[in-house]
Amino acid sequence: MNRRQEHALVVAVLLCTASMSCVCAAQPIVTGSSQSANAAPDALGRETPRSSIRGFLEACHDGKYVRATGYLDLSRLPKNQRTTEGPELARQLGILLDRDMDFEVEDLSSTTEGQLNDGLDPDLERLARFRENGRAATLYLQRQEHNGNSVWVVSADSVSRIPQWSSLSQGPAIEKRLPPWLVETRLFGTALWVWIALAVLALLLSVVSKLLSRIVISLVKPVARRYAQGLQAYRLESFTEPLRLLLSVAVFRACMEAIGPSALLREYLLGLLALLAVFGLAALLMRVVDVVSDRMTARLDPRQRALSYSVLPLGVRFVKICIFCLALLIVLDQWGLHITTILAGVGVGGLAVALAAQKTIENLFGGISVISDRPVLVGDVCQFGGQTGVVEDIGLRSTRIRTAERTLVTIPNAQFSTMTLENLSRRDRMLFKPVLQLHRDTSPDQVRAMMQRIEQILRDEPKVDPTEVPVRFTKIVPEAYTLEVFAYVLTSDGSEYLRQQSRLLLKMLDAAAELGVRFAVPFQESVTAAAAQAGQGGPGARDEDSALRSLAL
């Protein structure tokens, strides 16, 4: 499987899991509320504390204060005052929440039961806390029954305290020095000057963080060259972007306290900052994974290129995908989405992909098994399925072997991983075992002398291990006496073995000639030799030719 195919497979998996997640996320989730099954949904969306306050703030920002009174419990006000004082109380509470930098909509519960472990009554939920000049107060939400629905509204006690805390809703001192049109012009409930300040802040952070990153890199490079010689320069520079992002997010979050955007805008900005911060950390972790991968690749044997070309890149991509998916789940959880539903969709999508790509996955895991277990490496000579060849490449889908006939055999890894493989290149020494057939007219003394000379030849060679019994008289047959030579050539190089084998065999031929020992010639060979004698003449030529051809290796 080449790199393009691997990328296509990863993209297909992500697309399938994402589509299954969207389908599953579209299904309704039952969270166990006390709402009647036959009751119509609440028109104002007050089912949870978070949705109730979000709806209240949206109504205030749209200037619909009469609608906003639907989120307040005005039961303590006389009925004839509710239409006049109710909108004013809603306006004051909206401004109070917008200008309280400690208040965040995301801190409110998104379940119909509310926060059950806050030590409060199950029907109460803490909305916001205020403190000024040693005075402290807390505003609460209360769950009530309305038209068969369980809804959350600002409690009557908290509504009665809104006027005394309205003094806290004074705007920042800088607004008094700005032109009125910058303060009075509002977009989504936020003054125009706040939008301008946020945009300028983002632009400044982009420019300043880039300059700071260049300075930091120039200072760190000499230290890295001295103490981390294996760390490449481009890897070091790759850390700058996620670090810039994280630094900018932290500074932007701190400056938001001074600028003071509205509550809803804070919610959206905090969600965006959470997204950037989580993915900034994810990008930073991915850079660390790249550095670790480089270090592992540098320590590998050059012959283990299958591990560095196939498994390590695949492992690095898998770890990066896991980091990205984990970051995505964290962000979705911060945004209030149901993670369990998404995980269920990912599981169903993964099962569908596994069933559709069964053979591909089988070969993939077979390749990982071959590469991790390493029965053979690239360049090794091995025997497989009755054939012998040199391993040229071990991929994720198949293994390619060059045979002695110079053909290229491609074997799927699912099959190759189950074969019995004999790695000839892993031998620490090579067996030298020729069989000598001596002629029947050889005397016993000549046989003894021949055995002694062969053993002496083996023991005189520094690159030969003659073993305990290097020469063995094994058979007496009608045609010949059989001598078996059993020794090891101390090399794993095939070419060196062939050179040593030729040298030993020639010395044995010289010893046989000195001792007058003839080698047995099969009947078929003797006929051929006789024909050669008739054509060329000379018994010496016949004997020499027959001896050379009858030497069994």
Image: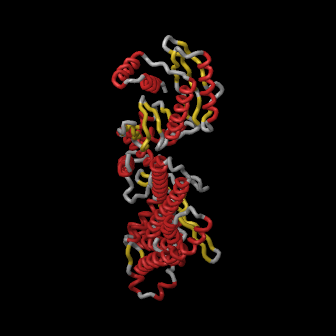
Image: 217 above or below 325: below
Percent of width and height locating residue 521: 45, 19
Image: 515 above or below 444: below
Outermost left residue? 535
- How many callouts does the rendering have? 0
Report the front residue among 393 and 214: 393
Q: Name the residue: 42% across, 43% down.
A: 392
Quadrant housing the N terminus: top left
Percent of width and height locating residue 350: 41, 43
Q: Is residue 419 visible?
A: yes
Report the front residue among 409 and 186: 409
Question: In screen coordinates, is 122 left or right of 310?
Answer: right
Report the front residue among 88 and 325: 325
Quadrant location of residue 469? Answer: top right
Quadrant location of residue 531? Answer: top left
Percent of width and height locating residue 446: 59, 19
